[in-house]
Amino acid sequence: GLAFAFGDEAVYLPLAHDYPGAPAQVSMDLALGTLKPWLERAERKKVGEDVKFDTHVLANHGVRLSGCAHDTLLESYVLEVHEKHDLAMLAQRHCGRTVLSREDVTGKGAGRIAFASLDIARATEYAAQRTDCSLSLHELLFRKIQDDDKLNFVYGKIEMPVLPVVASTIS
């Protein structure tokens, strides 16, 4: 599925959940066909968490992600190269929030289930929570970067301009 946050609202669009009793869902082709013009428009600025990964996943479905103005993972690296950068750690460190991990919702080890087998309500809770947290983190982290001329230069003139190039080299 896909998750989006707009202001104070986060939503999840389930696309391929497959388990007994799973409700009907929009097809992947219809969803991506509908969203593709927006996802590919550079003028439509987007904030992501690990945009490099998202770019790769969408490219596998024929979508060339464009317009990524910010990446919370890169913001974190620029601010705190010595710290852990996963969303759960960032949320705890900067927002005092606990977010669900993938293991929290899918389990681990032999009992782990595929995300597609996860109940849509639980998947929605997980995806929307993480997307909302990413947007909140961006607002905090980017403000800190803007307050420091050197960090602002590294992030704005080096890291973000190189991101599309690095993302395009992932196979």
Image (tube, rainbow, N blue to C red):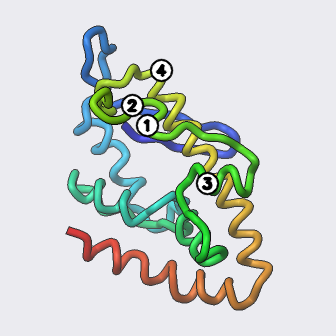
- Label 1 to label 4: alpha-carbon separation: 16 Å
* Residue 9 percent location from the top left of the image: 64, 37
Residue tagged by mark 1? Answer: 103
- Label 3 to label 2: alpha-carbon separation: 19 Å
- Label 3 to label 4: alpha-carbon separation: 24 Å
- Label 4 to label 2: alpha-carbon separation: 13 Å
Choose the circle earlier in sequence order: 3 or 1: 3
Residue tagged by mark 3? Answer: 89
Which residue is painted at 59% across and 82% down in the image?
Answer: 156
Residue tagged by mark 4? Answer: 121
Q: Is mark 1 on a helix, strand or loop?
A: helix
Say what amino acid the circle numbered 1 marks.
Glu
Query: Dot 1 surroundings within 10 Å: few (below 14), some, or many (20 or more)?
Result: few
**Quadrant where the N terminus is found in the figure:** top left
Above-or-below relation of 84 to 155: above
- Front in this rendered view, residue 83 or 13: 83
Above-or-below relation of 111 to 29: above
CB atoms of marks 4 and 2 within 8 Å: no
* Residue 107 percent location from the top left of the image: 39, 30
Residue tagged by mark 2? Answer: 106
Choose the circle earlier in sequence order: 1 or 4: 1
In this view of the protein, can residue 16 be seen by the observer?
Answer: no
CB atoms of marks 1 and 2 within 8 Å: yes
Query: Dot 4 surroundings within 10 Å: few (below 14), some, or many (20 or more)?
Result: few
- Label 3 to label 1: alpha-carbon separation: 15 Å
**Quadrant where the C terminus is found in the figure:** bottom left
Residue furthest front as drawn: 109
